[in-house]
Image: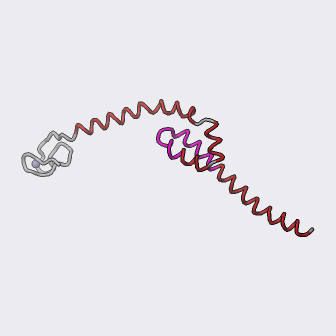
Amino acid sequence: MYTCTKCGNILDGNGMCPSCGTAHTIPKSQPQYQQQQYQQQQYYQQPNNQMYDTKIATTGMLVLCFFIPLAGIILYAVEKAQNPTAAGKYLKIAIISIVLNIIFSILIAVVMPVLMVGSALY
Ligand SMILES: [Zn+2]
């Protein structure tokens, strides 16, 4: 926290005292500049990540996501930040797998009693 050299008021970080209007150079501005540089570096890295996206979402991984939907959801959570495209594919296949599983178990739940009733008649 920095205070005004003229009136002692707490500075809000705009480089000007909110009470008396005296201009100040706040040492805070240096870390802010470094943060901006870091954000710019992330922007430069993004095109590379997008290129890797299609490579990472391999057929083997997608098959894994289909048979183990939980793995797909975990992969989505892990890859979401760095590879949104690949992560989206994992999640989509995991959801498709879960939906198919639900449909399949409903079919079994409906068909099985029918089969049992059918066999009981004989
Ligand atoms: Zn002041």
Residue depicted at x 63% and y 43%: 64
Q: Residue at x 80, y 61 (%)?
A: 111
Q: Which residue shows up at 64% across the image and 36% down it? A: 59
Q: Nearer the viewer, residue 84 or 56?
A: 56
Between 13 and 78, the residue placed more toward the observer is 78
Residue 55 percent coordinates (x, y): 57, 32
Where is residue 16 drawn, in percent x and y?
16, 44
Q: Quadrant of the C terminus?
A: bottom right
Q: Residue at x 54, y 34 (%)?
A: 53
Label total for image: 0
Q: Report the side of 75 relative to 118 (left or right).
A: left
Percent position of residue 49, x then y: 49, 33
* Rendered position, 56 above or below 3: above
The reply to whether the magenta stretch includes residue 21 is no
Q: Main secondary structure of the magenta part?
A: helix
Percent position of residue 112, x then y: 80, 63
Q: Residue furthest bottom?
A: 121
Left or right, 45 with respect to 25, comes to right
Q: Is 19 drawn above or below residue 29 in the view shown?
A: below
93 falls in the magenta region = yes
Identify which residue, 21 or 62, lies in the foreground.
62
**Part of the protein shown in magenta:** 76-95
The residue sitting at the right extreme is 122
Q: How is the image coloured?
A: secondary structure
Q: Nearer the viewer, residue 109 or 32?
A: 109
